[in-house]
Image (cartoon, rainbow, N blue to C red):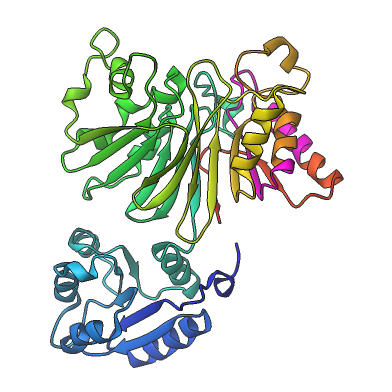
Amino acid sequence: MDSPVQHRSVVRKKVLLVDDDTDLLALRRMRLQADGYEVREVTDGAFAMETMAAFQPDLVILDLLLPNVSGDTLLTRIREIPAYESVRIIVSSAKKFETDQKLCLQLGADAYLVKPVDHGVLGATIRKLLKEEVTVRFWGTRGSIARPGRDTLKFGGNTPCVTVELNRDRVFIFDAGTGIVDYGRTLSAERHFKFNLFISHPHWDHIQGLPFFQPLYRPGNEMVIHGTSHGRLSLREVISGQMNNLYFPVTIKEYASRVYFNELHEGDNEVDQLQVSAIGLNHPGTTLGYRVTSEIGKTVAYITDNEIFPNGDAHNRCRLIEFLKNTDVLIHDSTYFDEEYPSHVGWGHSALTEVLKLAEEAQVKNLCLFHHDPGHDDDAVERKEMLAKLYFEERLSDTRCSAAREGAALVI
């Protein structure tokens, strides 16, 4: 990961420290200023709101045990003011009780760190909350059908699901294979979430986990499902069809959360104030690939179930290269070894070398090999990863490459 200084914007972000420990304040101020932040301090809770108004911080680091006005009271006051809605708040307290942590998160804190806090942990939390880094996390990497077992432990057996975490409140989900079930298990039942789910296409392995995504059965959550219609079937009809009582005992109407549908087409779209571009892919049926751009210009492209024909359609290849140009992270279908591909032409998936050529031509910074064939065990996927790395090393390419591993995260 790049150093905090390299992530600094031209305009310095402002951090307000609210704590009565003057020694701690001096140390934090020095380190945060070295990281490139503008810092101001308050030692008495009674003056915190006045300083907020004058300083207009981007982020507040707040102790709970303060003279005159407690930290949880200040947290409540800040969250009651609409003008401070975008201000990120980290509670940093010696109180390690679970009840205090839950209360602060319910009151609107973005993070709770128990003192003493390592500066590396604090800095990483600040960068994430201020949208200065993006985390790509893999929950399902397998294609076609789930493949659990002792010989898939390293790279995973769940079908496609990837999250792109931009901050605490904004997580984009790409596809809802069985991997989304494990993602749902990690989410607190004490908080409410708004999910943006992007469906590449409705083949079973990309939607089969959605009926088992537990947060949708809890009131207060909200999900917008983005994707495309298919012929006469709307996106809503396509997604709800798998929960028809002929196939599943619970219908989509029984979700306790609110679920909305947004039909997308090729081109640029704005979702939660971020640009999400879509492109049609070469796969049976209508399939979309996505590229999301963060506030600081980091880009992640999700291109699964895409067949690159060797020496094929030059026009569509050029379109895809332009779509992916200089992408920070490319997640691409690389289902087959080169020698396997001839017997699978027209199945809608790519051979390894064609994906490597695409990433090289598009000058992609990080390539993640994805949609592992259900017939490939960990040894086979590892061999594919080794061949890919060798390909880039031989060409002295700057592209970094790895095979997507279930549970792994890539921070940019």
Could you say which is closer to the camera, residue 186 or residue 206? 206
Could you say which is closer to the camera, residue 18 or residue 400? 400
Percent of width and height locating residue 338: 77, 22
Relative placement, left or right, of 183 versus 257 is: right
- Callout count: 0
Quarter of the image where one finds residue 196: top left
Which residue sits at x=46%, y=68%?
Answer: 121
Relative placement, left or right, of 406 versus 233 is: right
Quarter of the image where one finds residue 62: bottom left
Percent of width and height locating residue 287: 49, 24
Above or below 330: residue 181: above
In the displayed image of the protein, which residue is found farthest to the front?
315
Which residue sits at x=71%, y=24%?
Answer: 351
Quadrant location of the C terminus? bottom right
Above or below 262: residue 241: above
User: Is 361 covered by the magenta stretch?
Assistant: yes
Percent of width and height locating residue 116: 39, 76
User: Is 387 covered by the magenta stretch?
Assistant: yes
Which residue sits at x=26%, y=71%?
Answer: 95
Q: Which residues are magenta?
A: 360-388
In the displayed image of the protein, which residue is found farthest to the right?
394
Which residue sits at x=79%, y=44%?
Answer: 392
Relative placement, left or right, of 169 versus 384 is: left
Percent of width and height locating residue 226: 36, 34
Quadrant location of the N terminus? bottom right
Above or below 134: residue 96: below
